Amino acid sequence: MLAQTPLLTGMPASASDLERVDIDMQTVLDFLESVVAAPGRLDEHADLLESLGPFWFLRRRLADGIRLLRHAAATCTTGACTPRTTAVVTLSLGSALAYSQSAEEAHELLTSYTFDDVERIVVAGDQDPERRTIRLASLALAAWVGDDHALAGDYVARAAASLSSASDGIVALVTATSALCELVAGEMAASLEHAHTALALSTERADPLAMHLAAVVMGIGSLFDGDPRMGLRWNDQAFRAYLDAGGV
C-alpha cells in the first residue's frame, strides 16, 4: 500500500493519497516499527521513511513520525546501517522536528551534513534522479516552517538550480517555496512574482500544496498593500488548497 501511494514518491497531489494511508494507520505503524528496529530493513526502506515527511505534517501525525525517526536514528548509531541511511534518517528527523517547532534540535540535525556531504552520501544512491530536487524542496519547506529561514533559502536555491533536470510536476512546489523564502527575506517583488507563477503552475498541474503556499504569500502581500479584504480571500483559498492537499 505504501509503495503504491503517489504521495510517497513526491509531494502530495490529493487528499485521497494521504487519507488512504491514514485509514489503516495502525498497520502502517506496525510495519514501520519493524523497519526502524532492524538495520537491514532500515537500509532497504530509508527512502520510504524520507518520503513520509509531508504525511506526518499534513495529517498531524508528527508525534508518530518523530518517535519512529528517533528509533531509526538509534538503530543507525549501532553502526550497522549504511552512511546513506544514517544521513537520510538524520535529515528526515530534522525535518519532522522543524515542522514541530523544535527549532534548535532541528537546526542541528539539518546542518549536520553539508550540501556536498548530501550530494556525495545521499544523492549518489538515489534510484530516482528526481528525488534530489524533491528532497531539497521538502527540506526547504520544513526549515521554513521551523523558522530557520536562512537555511530554507539555501535549500530552495539549490532545488531551483536543479529544476532543469526535474519533471514539470515539481516546478510549482519549488517556485512556491521560493516565494515563501523571498517573502521573509523582504524581497517582496520577487516573492509575489514567484507566487503568481506558482499559482498558474499549480492550477495547470493540479498541485494543491503548491497552490496553498502561493496563496499564503499572496494573502500576506495583500495585507502589505493595505487590502485586508483581498487578504482574507487569499487566506480562504489557501485553506481550501490545504484541505485539497490532504491537510487536516
Image (cartoon, rainbow, N blue to C red):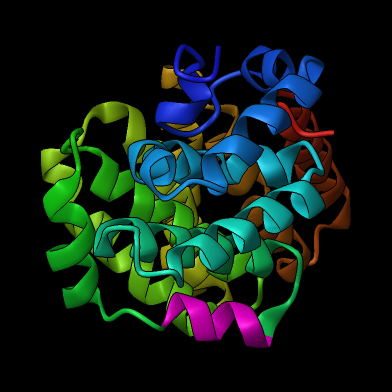
Q: Is residue 106 magenta?
A: yes
Q: Is residue 112 visible?
A: yes
Q: Which residues are magenta?
A: 104-111
Q: Quadrant of residue 63?
A: bottom right
Figure label count? 0
Q: Is residue 169 magenta?
A: no
Check the image and report above or below for 13 versus 116.
above
Locate residue 72 relative to residue 112 in the image: left or right: right
Q: Is residue 180 visible?
A: no
Residue 246 drawn at (x, y percent): 72, 26
Locate residue 11 relative to residue 167 in the image: left or right: right
Q: Main secondary structure of the magenta part?
A: helix
- Residue appearing at x 69%, y 13% in the figure: 20
Check the image and report above or below for 166 versus 232.
above
Check the image and report above or below for 198 versus 123.
above
For the residue pair 233 and 144, the one nearer the viewer reads as 144
- Residue appearing at x 70%, y 58% in the figure: 66
Check the image and report above or below for 190 versus 64.
below
Residue 211 drawn at (x, y percent): 58, 35
- Residue appearing at x 18%, y 54% in the figure: 123
Residue 183 drawn at (x, y percent): 55, 71
